[in-house]
Structure formats: C-alpha cells, structure tokens
Image: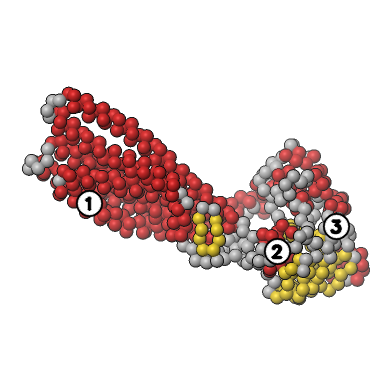
Amino acid sequence: MVRSWRGWRVSTSSPSGRDVLRESIRGQRRDVGVGALLGSGHQIGEALVPVLIGVAIDQAVTDSDTGALLVCLGVLAVGYVALALSFRFGAMAGERAAARAEHTLRISLVRRILDPGGGAEEGRLPGALANIATEDAKRVGAVNMALMAGISALTGILTCAVVLLRMSLTLGLVVLLGTPVLLWLGHLLSKPLEHRSEAEQERAAHASAVAADLVTGLRILKGIGGESAAIARYRTTSRDSLGATLKAARAQAFQSGVVLALTGCLIAAVALVGGRLAAQGSISLGELVSAVGLALFLLGPLETLSWVNAELAQGRASATRIAEVVATPATITAGERSLSQPVRGAVRLDGVRHGGLRGVDLDVAPGELLGVVATDPAHAGDLLRCLARRTDPDTGTVALDGMSLRDLDPAELRTAMLVADHDADLFAGTVRENVTAAAPDGADPEQAMAAAGVTQVAQTLPDGEHTPVGERGHSLSGGQRQRVALARALAAERPVLVVHDPTTAVDAVTEARIAAGLREIRKGRTTILVTTSPALLSVTDRVVLLDEGRVTDTAPHADLIQRHEAYRTAVLA
C-alpha cells in the first residue's frame, strides 16, 4: 500500500530510513541546488585567494611592480565581497531547504498519527511521538543543509587539486589520492555514531514521554503523595537518556578527532611536498606560498566533510525512526463505498462479538434518542470502540443506513457519526475555540453551549468563553471540562452522536438541565447515550440493557427499573 504525503511519498508496507532521506531531499531539490551552486562558487573563490596572493608575490612584490600590486589587491577586494555574498545567500538557501524539509516531515508525521485508520500511536507514548515529530524531523531536515555543504566542500577540494596539478603533478596527486581515503575513513567512523545516535534519540524520546506523562498527572500525584516515586522514576529514565547522549557525544568526538588528525596529516604532506619542490626550484616562491595557503584552505572543506558525515549518520538514525512511525500498519482499513446523502442515521448491530460482547443485536431508528446501560463498564468500552470503528468486531457487523462500517473510509464515517468518549481531552485554547473545534464553518455554537451548560461555566470565568483553558483543560474543574467536551460534541452537528457518560462530574441539578437541553438540541437526529445516569436515561425514547455482553431487554427507563435487579443496581447504586 502506498500513501501520499505532502513533499514525499513512501510505501507504508516497507519504507526505510533511506526512503525518508531520499524523499526529503527530493522535495527540496531547488533550494539545495541553489545553495550548492552558491556554496561551490564560494569555495572556488576561497581556493583562488591563495593563488592570487601567490601571483601578487611573483609579479608585484618580487618585481617591485606597484601597479600590479594594486591590481591584485583590487581583485582580492572584489573577490572577498563576492565571497561574502555567495556565502550569505548560499547558507540562506541551505537553511531554507532544511527548515522546509523539517516542516514537511512534521506535517506528514502528524497526518499519519491522526490518520483515521489509527495504529501509529500504538505502543508509543505521546511524548515519544512528539520527540520524533520535532527532534528527529529536525535532524532529517538538516541533511539538506549537510548535502549542500558537502557538495560545496568537494568542489573546493577539486578546485584545490586542479590548481595544485597545474603547479605540480606531485602536489595535485597528493590531494586527489588523499581525499578519497579521508572520505572513506570518515564514513567508516560514522557507523558507530549512527547506532549510538539512534539509541540517544530513543532514550531522549522515552524521557520526554515520561516527563509529559508525569506533568499530565501532576494533580493526581500530589493528591496521593506519589511525588517521591515519580521523581525516582524520572531520575532513572533521565539517567538512561544522559548515558545514551554521552555515548553518542563520545562517538562524535572520536570521529571528529580522528578525521581532524588525518586531515592534518594530509595538509602537512601538501606543505612538505611543496617545500621540497620550492627548494629544488621546481616551483616559484609565489607558488610555494599558494601551495601552503591551499593546504591551509583544505582544512575547511575537510572539516566540513567530517561534519557532513556526522550529520548524515544522525540523519539516517532519525529517518529510520520516522519511517517506523509511517510504516505502522493501520488498525482499520479503509473501505471503498460511500454513504448515501443525506445520512438518515439508522444504526444496526447484527451478531457483534468483540471483547466482552457476545452476539449483540441492536436496531436504532433514525432520529431516535437511545440509552444504553452496560452492567460491566468494559462492555460499554467494547461497544464504543465498535461504533467509532476504532476496531472491527471479531464477528458480526455494525451498519449505518444499511452499509457496513467495514466498507466505509473511517474519515468519511467520522463526518456522519461522532463518538464522544467520557475522558475526551480539551485542547490548549479558549473555551469557545474548544467548543467550535469540530463545528461546521460558520455554525453558531451558542445553542450547543447552552444545552451542555457551558454558558453558565463561561459566566464564572475571568474572560467568559474567551478564557484560555490551559493544556488539556487543566485550568477547569472536572465538571467544567465535561461540559465543554459535551458542547464540542453537540456543536459538531453530526447525524449520529454517541456520548459516553458526559455528566459524571456535575451536580444533580445541572445534570437534569443538561439532559433536557441534550434532548432538545438533538431532536430529529440519532443519539445514543451510553450511560448509567438516571437523569439522562429518563429523557431517552427507550433504553437497552446490556448484561453479560448481551442485549437482555429494551424498554423505557421507568419500565426497566421495575423489571430488572441488574438494571437497578447499575443506575441507582
């Protein structure tokens, strides 16, 4: 299966880090090309500076020709201006390519994580995914800058070799033969760095995930006095991350140090050979100065290539981590059929078996307000997962308007049926922004806010409905968060709405008011309330009792209270 992402394309069946790197570079070919062209021009100019100085020595200083000296100085001045401009704009193009590639990768990862088919988040904490979408994407994006710098450095080395060949065949061969050896050794030395960089990112991602997890549950930890255990847990995780980082740093330092030492040997060889040739009279004094200057110039490109090797090693490790997320198979496969419009909202479950469900049969008429009471909360969760199509039943079918959910694209299903979980999180933003997050364009959320009791909540807040709620709504109380989440579900105006225990943290008076408002705002549209709240169940058209994984009865709320001890225990206990 192949999925298309903005800027690059990989097969989700068997992608690799190499695929990610290749497509990341391909998406930024223009900027990388411009940067490499300007960088190469800069390197050529840098290499020609010692040559111009040598010419000035031979033609102006040695012969005491003031005019020739001034000309040489003028050419050098113009050359330095060109060098400054080419470096500035070349670096700008490279940085732009890196930033754009990083942005494209980040957007692609977020799209995969939020894909209706799911799967990418399985086995990964949110903090780990955030680390991959930030640090790893940044390292892969930086490969574009490294590629540009590497091409420029190679151009500089080649220019240096050509100039030295024109001076002396021996000098040129020293550079031409020595550089490939250095590059090969640098590549070999980058292998341990690649492995340790991957381990470093893994441990850093885990530490970030644990930190995010602890911060999210800070109130609970303080309430139960678990601060010491939490600190000990994070200290261990952080120590592991630090150890992996130090190993990667040592590998990078070793690689850089060895390559720098070998580079020094090459430069010394060029200077030594040049000195011998000058002593023998094979080259002039100016050519000797040029040779020494070119040998010193070589330090820059060779150090750049060492840095490029390190960046490529880290980029490959991060690209592998990104590819693993993108390659995660979807939990739900997309069907090819489309819903008939308009959606009537008829929901049918036929012989559904999943988890604790044991052959559930259920018909929900279009526009019906149905209550579902599960005597086992786990069975309620199994039912919600099937209705939301976060999973498919082991056997049986769930259908909307006569069409099996298996035959639909999960993204299209979300536009017709919304399942609002009991523990739905809020987003960082204002109360109103949270309520309107899934609302149709131009829709007025006031009715939904009033029905869910958010209007009363807004009256108690400093800036009303424009008050920021903080990350995950932590600045609000539990009851306030529930009401905002319910208002968000109502404001979405889906033909079918499934709500799970939306009022467990509100008082009885508010709950009764919400029940009446919910019935009014959802009139004529299919609504399923999976709850044990008597206030909510009393406004439903009928209630289904789900006991021991099976539908054992269906009737109005008052009748079920009279008929079933299990029902009374579930809703009145």
From where the camera sits, is residue 38 visible? yes
Residue 243 shown left or right of residue 385 in the figure:
left
Q: CA distance from mark 1 to mark 2?
A: 64 Å
Mark 1 touching mark 2, by CB under 8 A?
no
Residue density around tag 1, few if under 14, some if 14–19, many if 20 or more, within 10 Å: some
Task: State the residue in front, 70 or 257.
Answer: 70
Q: CA distance from mark 3 to mark 1?
A: 81 Å
Q: Residue 74: x and y, percent?
A: 26, 27
From where the camera sits, is residue 252 visible? no
The residue lying at 22 percent from left, 49 percent from top is 175
Residue density around tag 3, few if under 14, some if 14–19, many if 20 or more, within 10 Å: some
Mark 3 touching mark 1, by CB under 8 A?
no
Residue density around tag 2, few if under 14, some if 14–19, many if 20 or more, within 10 Å: few
Q: Earlier in the sequence, mark 3 or mark 1?
A: 1
Task: State the residue in front, 90 or 248.
Answer: 90
Q: Earlier in the sequence, mark 1 or mark 2?
A: 1
* Quadrant of the snapshot with the C terminus: bottom right
The residue lying at 71 percent from left, 67 percent from top is 405
Q: Residue 426: x and y, percent?
A: 69, 50
Q: Which mark identifies residue 524?
A: 3
The outermost residue toward the top is 66
Q: CA distance from mark 3 to mark 2?
A: 23 Å
User: Is residue 461 depicted above or below 126 in this figure?
Assistant: above
Tag 2, which secondary structure? loop
Q: Quadrant location of residue 17?
A: bottom left
The residue lying at 67 percent from left, 48 percent from top is 427
Task: State the residue in front, 262 or 78.
Answer: 78
Residue 19 shown left or right of residue 550 in the figure:
left
Tag 3, which secondary structure? loop
